[in-house]
């Protein structure tokens, strides 16, 4: 047992590499090495955040990540402290047959091997232990866990020195991972306006991964809802629908030509037009939009 101990003492990042290689090649870590992993885990506290981040990114997309997450949470918890309260935390819910940590591991493994998707799923329920309540009938609830998880995600990603773009995207995805989105064009367009197509598709994959971690009795219905949402998105994109200011058939110059003063009122006018088009109250046709502008140019807040 002395050899693995010495190797981990030389460079504690080798603990994470051991988990990554075992996950990537579906290997079983021999007992003496596993014991050394647990024994020397505190060495990870002294590894540079950038090195931990790079190794975590590689680890999360391995095929055997579920088993590694389930069997070695104490190692990851050294630099991801939100994990410890999740381990063994029962959910007492008809929607979940696994404790919070095993559900998380199952979701990560079930998702597409995309770093951002799996990183968001690793964090998506981090706030659950702090938001748990049990009602009189013995049903567990986690009201407000999504924003709580988003706060933990922000703190975690900063500590690991992720770049700002990644950090902001992951935090946003975690915050809205369980927000219901109807599979209807107006709703999809609103979310496209907020997220953009690329990030919205990541959100759908996160919802899909989360659904796969649900109790067997509800998995089919949960996945059907995600599939319907994705199909609606595909239809909206294929139709070339307008879902942002840049998709409008008019621009800022057109707005000013209709009598709207330059500056912030132009932006408000374009935002109003986008909303009208998204909600289906106006077609995205130049003359119709110009007519609407001319008829409303005299108002200040809603042109």
Image (tube, grey):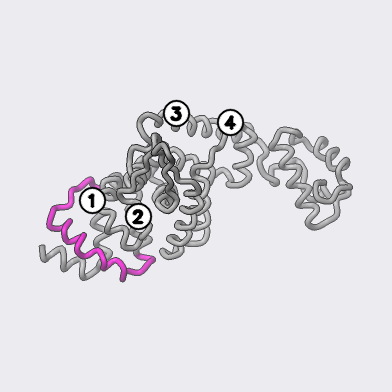
Q: Nearer the viewer, mark 4 or mark 2?
A: 2
Check disc 2 and report the residue beneath it. 85
In percent of the image, x 45 and y 50: which residue is there?
Answer: 131
| Element type where label 4 sits in the image | helix
Check disc 1 and report the residue beneath it. 22
Q: Earlier in the sequence, mark 4 or mark 3?
A: 3
Residue found farthest to the left? 1
Query: Disc 1 and disc 2: Cα gap in Å?
Result: 25 Å
| CB-based contact (under 8 Å), mark 4 and mark 3 | no
* Residue 291 point in image, percent of width and height: 85, 38
Query: Disc 3 and disc 2: Cα gap in Å?
Result: 29 Å
In this rendering, the answer to whether 135 lies above or below 232 is: below
| CB-based contact (under 8 Å), mark 3 and mark 2 | no
Check disc 3 and report the residue beneath it. 221
Tell whether position 107 is magenta: no
| Element type where label 1 sits in the image | helix
Q: Nearer the viewer, mark 1 or mark 2?
A: 2
Q: Earlier in the sequence, mark 1 or mark 4?
A: 1
Circle 3: is it few (<14), some (14-19), or many (20+) Cα within 10 Å? few
Q: Earlier in the sequence, mark 3 or mark 2?
A: 2
Check disc 4 and report the residue beneath it. 235
Question: Which region shows up in magenta?
Answer: 25-51
Observer-nearest residue: 285 or 220? Answer: 220
Q: Earlier in the sequence, mark 3 or mark 1?
A: 1
* Residue 192 point in image, percent of width and height: 60, 42
Circle 2: is it few (<14), some (14-19), or many (20+) Cα within 10 Å? some
Q: Earlier in the sequence, mark 1 or mark 2?
A: 1
């Amino acid at each position: 047992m002395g050899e693995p101990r010495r190797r981990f003492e030389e460079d504690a990042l080798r603990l994470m590499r051991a988990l990554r290689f075992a996950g990537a090649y579906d290997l079983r870590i021999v007992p003496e090495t596993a014991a050394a992993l647990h024994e020397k885990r505190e060495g990870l506290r002294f590894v540079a955040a950038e090195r931990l981040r790079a190794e975590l990114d590689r680890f999360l997309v391995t095929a055997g990540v579920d088993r590694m997450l389930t069997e070695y949470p104490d190692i990851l918890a050294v630099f991801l402290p939100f994990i410890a309260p999740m381990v063994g935390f029962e959910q007492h819910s008809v929607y979940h047959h696994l404790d919070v940590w095993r559900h998380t591991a199952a979701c990560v493994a079930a998702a597409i091997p995309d770093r951002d998707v799996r990183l968001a799923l690793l964090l998506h329920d981090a706030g659950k232990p702090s938001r748990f309540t049990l009602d009189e009938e013995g049903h567990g609830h986690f009201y407000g866990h999504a924003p709580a998880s988003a706060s933990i995600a922000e703190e975690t990603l900063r500590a690991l020195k992720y770049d700002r773009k990644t950090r902001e995207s992951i935090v946003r995805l975690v915050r809205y991972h369980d927000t219901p989105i109807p599979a209807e064009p107006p709703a999809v367009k609103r979310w496209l306006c907020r997220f953009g197509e690329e990030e919205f598709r990541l959100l759908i994959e996160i919802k899909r991964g989360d659904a796969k971690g649900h109790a067997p009795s509800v998995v089919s219905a949960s996945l059907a809802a995600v599939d319907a949402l994705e199909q609606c998105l595909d239809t909206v994109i294929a139709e070339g629908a307008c879902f942002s200011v840049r998709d409008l058939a008019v621009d800022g110059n057109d707005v000013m030509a209709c009598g709207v003063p330059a500056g912030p009122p132009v932006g408000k006018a374009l935002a109003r037009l986008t909303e009208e088009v998204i909600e289906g109250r106006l077609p995205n046709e130049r003359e119709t939009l110009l007519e609407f502008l001319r008829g409303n140019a005299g108002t200040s807040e809603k042109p």
